[in-house]
Image (cartoon, grey):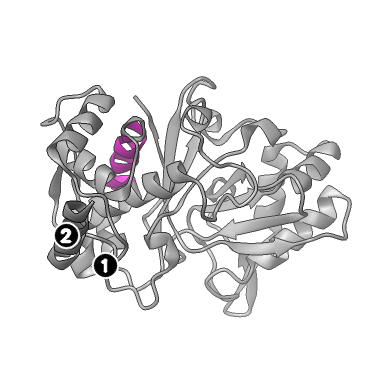
Amino acid sequence: MADDGDAIEILYARGVTDGLPVIPPTAARVRAAVEASGRAGDELIGLVAPRLGRATVEKIAINAVLAGCRPEYVPAVIAGVEAICDPAFALVGVSGTTDAVAPLLILNGPVRKELDVNCAAGAFGPGWRANATIGRAVRLVWANVGGAAATSMSTFAQTGRYSYCIGEYQEESPWEPLHVEHGFAAGDSTVAALAAEAPQVVVDARNRTARDILTTVARSGEAIASHTQGSLSDTVLVISPEHARTVAGDGWSKAQVRDFVWEHTRAEVDGVRVPKFHEPANVKIVVAGGTAGRFSAWIPGWPFPGAPAGLVLKRIR
């Protein structure tokens, strides 16, 4: 324990942590993490911006150990790294923006139960090792392999830069899950990644119809970035199980929810009311959170008109 304590201080001094204590990546720990991935340690997964560092399986495993991951989490971490290295994620721009975005990870499929990923009450909060360490590992790869720690220009940043990872609560969703919408099989396990700001919670405990609840959600969404910002790109709308049951109980499909929210979430640009998002497909809907509580939440993506960063999904091998 004393040796580990010394190593923690050495690693902090080297600048390879996020400010929190880390698990020293001993050879045995890293070897176990690589073996759990089922891949060769020298396999290249991606080039991590902004410095285009080479994220091999072994380097990802080292950062997974630092983050506190169990070995069985490593395939999910690898998929998360694949996602942020995809050009559609625009990690170069995200690395240099002054906005407070962080890589949000959303897990779908059997992996949620296999790894005990929290999809329910407190989904964005502490207390769940898989959520905390998978998200943290991807962030550490971005920093330690990609060099993001030294080049962050964020005015405020946010706590999601420690870890930002949830699962979709598919069992409580009346609609098809996110990964199926994007062409994956229901039995696939996936990680979706989006450069995202912190959740903006919407409260509607009074209304009992789909139209009224979604009107509240849409009006609340007008505050994203500012009421004058329109034509935004991908943003996640997290609907709680209670709200989802009410909305679906009125016969609304996910496509109808998306179209309604897109039409009714408006921005005032040069005195004209225009859609907040570039197109309906930019509103990505998932169900998550506790079964008690009539809340939903907007999770703004990189909130600038024409921002290239989008939601990216990768299958977990």
> How many angstroms separate mark 2 from mark 1 (CA)?
33 Å
In the rendered structure, find residue 6 and report the number of the disc placed on it: 2
**Mark 2 surroundings within 10 Å by alpha-carbon count, few (fewer than 14), some (14 through 19), many (20 or more):** few
Q: Please tell me which residue lies in front, 190 or 141.
A: 141
Q: Is residue 71 above or below residue 287?
A: above
Residue 49 appearing in the image: no
Q: Which residues are magenta?
A: 74-88
Along the horizontal axis of the image, is 302 left or right of 243?
A: left
x, y (%) of residue 56? Answer: 15, 37
Which of the numbered marks, if any, corresponds to residue 122? none
Measured as percent of width and height from the top left, residue 275 is found at 61, 62
Label of residue 96 in the image: 1
- The number of numbered badges drawn on the structure is 2
| Residue 18 pos. (x, y %) | 29, 62
In which image quadrant can residue 251 be found? top right
Residue 79 colored magenta? yes
Q: Which amino acid type is marked by label 1?
A: Gly
Residue 9 placed where, x, y %? 19, 64
**Looking at the image, residue 183 lies above or below residue 302:** above
Name the side, left or right, on which 57 lies relative to 244.
left
Q: Main secondary structure of the magenta part?
A: helix
Decide which of tag 2 and tag 1 comes sooner along the chain.
Answer: 2
Residue 282, visible in the rendered structure: yes
* Residue at the image position 89 percent from the left and 52 percent from the top: 208
Q: Amino acid at mark 2?
A: Asp
